[in-house]
Amino acid sequence: MKQHVVSALVENRAGTLSRVSGLFSRRGFNIDSLTVGTTDDASISRMTIAVTGDDAVLEQIIKQLSKLVDVIAVRELESESCLRRELMLVKVGVDEKTRHAVIEVAGIFRSRVVDVSPATITIEATGDAKKLDGLLLLLRPYGVLELARTGLVALERGSSILSISN
Protein backbone atom coordinates (compact mmCIF):
# COMPACT_ATOMS: atom_id res chain seq x y z
CA MET A 1 0.00 0.00 0.00
CA LYS A 2 1.27 3.41 -0.97
CA GLN A 3 0.20 6.91 -0.07
CA HIS A 4 -1.15 8.76 -3.09
CA VAL A 5 -1.73 12.51 -3.32
CA VAL A 6 -4.64 13.69 -5.44
CA SER A 7 -5.12 17.32 -6.39
CA ALA A 8 -8.54 18.54 -7.47
CA LEU A 9 -9.91 21.88 -8.58
CA VAL A 10 -13.50 22.20 -7.39
CA GLU A 11 -16.31 24.75 -7.41
CA ASN A 12 -16.02 26.91 -4.30
CA ARG A 13 -19.59 26.60 -3.03
CA ALA A 14 -21.56 25.15 -0.14
CA GLY A 15 -21.79 21.36 -0.16
CA THR A 16 -18.77 20.62 -2.34
CA LEU A 17 -16.62 19.36 0.54
CA SER A 18 -19.51 17.25 1.81
CA ARG A 19 -20.03 15.63 -1.61
CA VAL A 20 -16.32 14.86 -2.01
CA SER A 21 -15.89 13.44 1.50
CA GLY A 22 -19.17 11.53 1.12
CA LEU A 23 -17.82 9.87 -2.02
CA PHE A 24 -14.85 8.57 -0.04
CA SER A 25 -16.94 7.26 2.84
CA ARG A 26 -19.48 5.55 0.54
CA ARG A 27 -16.65 3.73 -1.25
CA GLY A 28 -14.90 2.80 2.00
CA PHE A 29 -11.77 4.84 1.24
CA ASN A 30 -10.05 6.49 4.19
CA ILE A 31 -8.71 10.02 3.78
CA ASP A 32 -5.26 10.39 5.40
CA SER A 33 -5.22 14.15 4.88
CA LEU A 34 -7.58 16.67 3.29
CA THR A 35 -6.67 20.31 2.76
CA VAL A 36 -8.92 22.81 1.00
CA GLY A 37 -8.36 26.45 0.11
CA THR A 38 -9.41 28.97 -2.48
CA THR A 39 -7.24 29.61 -5.52
CA ASP A 40 -6.49 32.97 -7.12
CA ASP A 41 -10.01 32.64 -8.58
CA ALA A 42 -12.41 32.94 -5.62
CA SER A 43 -14.97 30.69 -7.35
CA ILE A 44 -12.52 27.75 -7.40
CA SER A 45 -10.89 25.85 -4.53
CA ARG A 46 -8.02 23.38 -4.59
CA MET A 47 -8.35 20.16 -2.64
CA THR A 48 -5.25 18.19 -1.77
CA ILE A 49 -6.25 14.69 -0.70
CA ALA A 50 -3.83 12.07 0.62
CA VAL A 51 -5.07 8.47 0.55
CA THR A 52 -3.41 5.13 1.12
CA GLY A 53 -4.11 2.27 -1.25
CA ASP A 54 -2.94 0.41 -4.29
CA ASP A 55 -3.10 1.66 -7.88
CA ALA A 56 -6.62 0.25 -8.34
CA VAL A 57 -7.88 2.31 -5.39
CA LEU A 58 -6.25 5.43 -6.83
CA GLU A 59 -7.79 4.80 -10.24
CA GLN A 60 -11.25 4.42 -8.67
CA ILE A 61 -10.84 7.60 -6.63
CA ILE A 62 -9.87 9.66 -9.68
CA LYS A 63 -12.70 8.21 -11.79
CA GLN A 64 -15.30 8.79 -9.08
CA LEU A 65 -14.09 12.34 -8.33
CA SER A 66 -14.16 13.18 -12.04
CA LYS A 67 -17.87 12.26 -12.15
CA LEU A 68 -18.85 14.77 -9.46
CA VAL A 69 -20.45 17.93 -10.89
CA ASP A 70 -18.43 20.20 -8.56
CA VAL A 71 -15.06 18.78 -9.66
CA ILE A 72 -13.41 20.76 -12.45
CA ALA A 73 -10.10 18.87 -12.78
CA VAL A 74 -8.38 16.07 -10.87
CA ARG A 75 -5.12 14.14 -11.03
CA GLU A 76 -2.50 12.39 -8.95
CA LEU A 77 0.61 14.29 -7.95
CA GLU A 78 3.58 11.92 -8.18
CA SER A 79 5.94 12.27 -5.20
CA GLU A 80 9.04 12.81 -7.34
CA SER A 81 7.47 15.58 -9.41
CA CYS A 82 5.74 17.67 -6.77
CA LEU A 83 6.42 19.80 -3.73
CA ARG A 84 4.66 18.65 -0.54
CA ARG A 85 4.45 20.67 2.64
CA GLU A 86 2.62 20.76 5.95
CA LEU A 87 2.45 23.36 8.68
CA MET A 88 2.67 22.31 12.31
CA LEU A 89 2.23 24.19 15.56
CA VAL A 90 3.54 22.37 18.63
CA LYS A 91 3.39 23.55 22.23
CA VAL A 92 6.15 22.10 24.40
CA GLY A 93 6.44 22.18 28.17
CA VAL A 94 9.68 23.83 29.36
CA ASP A 95 11.36 25.12 32.47
CA GLU A 96 14.49 27.20 32.98
CA LYS A 97 16.71 24.15 32.41
CA THR A 98 15.07 22.89 29.20
CA ARG A 99 14.03 26.15 27.47
CA HIS A 100 17.36 26.66 25.65
CA ALA A 101 17.51 23.02 24.47
CA VAL A 102 13.99 23.21 22.97
CA ILE A 103 14.88 26.46 21.18
CA GLU A 104 18.02 24.78 19.81
CA VAL A 105 16.01 21.81 18.49
CA ALA A 106 13.60 24.23 16.79
CA GLY A 107 16.54 26.01 15.16
CA ILE A 108 18.03 22.79 13.82
CA PHE A 109 14.76 22.16 11.96
CA ARG A 110 14.55 25.79 10.73
CA SER A 111 11.42 26.25 12.79
CA ARG A 112 10.29 29.43 14.49
CA VAL A 113 9.44 30.05 18.11
CA VAL A 114 6.12 31.92 17.86
CA ASP A 115 5.05 32.06 21.51
CA VAL A 116 6.82 31.87 24.85
CA SER A 117 5.43 31.64 28.37
CA PRO A 118 7.13 30.74 31.65
CA ALA A 119 6.10 27.08 31.22
CA THR A 120 5.73 26.60 27.44
CA ILE A 121 7.20 27.33 24.04
CA THR A 122 5.13 27.14 20.87
CA ILE A 123 6.99 26.29 17.68
CA GLU A 124 5.87 26.75 14.07
CA ALA A 125 7.39 24.34 11.56
CA THR A 126 6.86 23.74 7.86
CA GLY A 127 8.15 20.94 5.69
CA ASP A 128 7.38 17.46 4.49
CA ALA A 129 5.88 14.90 6.85
CA LYS A 130 9.26 13.26 7.57
CA LYS A 131 10.79 16.54 8.70
CA LEU A 132 7.85 17.31 10.99
CA ASP A 133 7.86 13.78 12.40
CA GLY A 134 11.60 14.12 13.09
CA LEU A 135 11.07 17.38 14.94
CA LEU A 136 8.32 15.80 17.03
CA LEU A 137 10.56 12.86 17.88
CA LEU A 138 13.15 15.23 19.36
CA LEU A 139 10.56 17.38 21.17
CA ARG A 140 8.57 14.55 22.79
CA PRO A 141 11.06 13.99 25.67
CA TYR A 142 10.44 17.61 26.76
CA GLY A 143 6.67 17.09 26.80
CA VAL A 144 4.45 17.89 23.83
CA LEU A 145 1.37 19.56 25.35
CA GLU A 146 -0.54 20.40 22.18
CA LEU A 147 -0.14 19.73 18.49
CA ALA A 148 -1.92 20.99 15.37
CA ARG A 149 -1.03 20.01 11.79
CA THR A 150 -2.60 21.50 8.68
CA GLY A 151 -2.53 18.47 6.47
CA LEU A 152 -0.74 18.20 3.18
CA VAL A 153 -0.57 20.85 0.47
CA ALA A 154 1.14 20.04 -2.80
CA LEU A 155 1.90 21.52 -6.21
CA GLU A 156 3.65 20.04 -9.21
CA ARG A 157 7.19 21.21 -9.87
CA GLY A 158 8.11 23.20 -12.97
CA SER A 159 5.66 24.55 -15.49
CA SER A 160 3.08 21.76 -15.21
CA ILE A 161 -0.22 23.01 -13.75
CA LEU A 162 -3.64 21.62 -12.90
CA SER A 163 -6.05 23.94 -14.66
CA ILE A 164 -9.64 24.17 -15.77
CA SER A 165 -8.70 23.01 -19.27
CA ASN A 166 -7.04 19.75 -18.04
Image (cartoon, grey):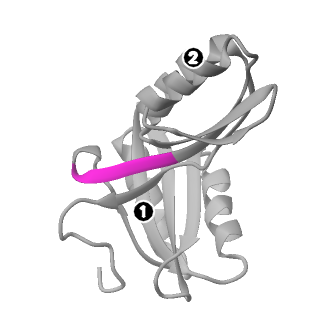
| Residue 136 painted magenta | no
Callout 2: SS: helix
Which labelled disc corresponds to residue 101?
2
- Magenta residues, as a range? 81-86
**Is residue 125 depicted above or below 63 in this figure?**
above
- Residue at (68% x, 14% y) in the render: 142
Where does label 1 land, which residue?
7
Q: Earlier in the sequence, mark 2 or mark 1?
A: 1
Residue type at mark 1: give it. Ser
Place of residue 48 in the rendered image (x, y in percent of width and height, measured from the top left): 49, 59
Q: Quick one: 105 or 30, which is closer to the camera? A: 105
- Residue at (30% x, 86% y) in the render: 165
Which residue is situated farthest in the right direction here?
118
Place of residue 164 in the rendered image (x, y in percent of width and height, measured from the top left): 36, 84
**Is residue 106 depicted above or below 70 in this figure?**
above
Callout 1: SS: strand
Quarter of the image containing the C terminus? bottom left
Relative placement, left or right, of 78 versus 122 is: left
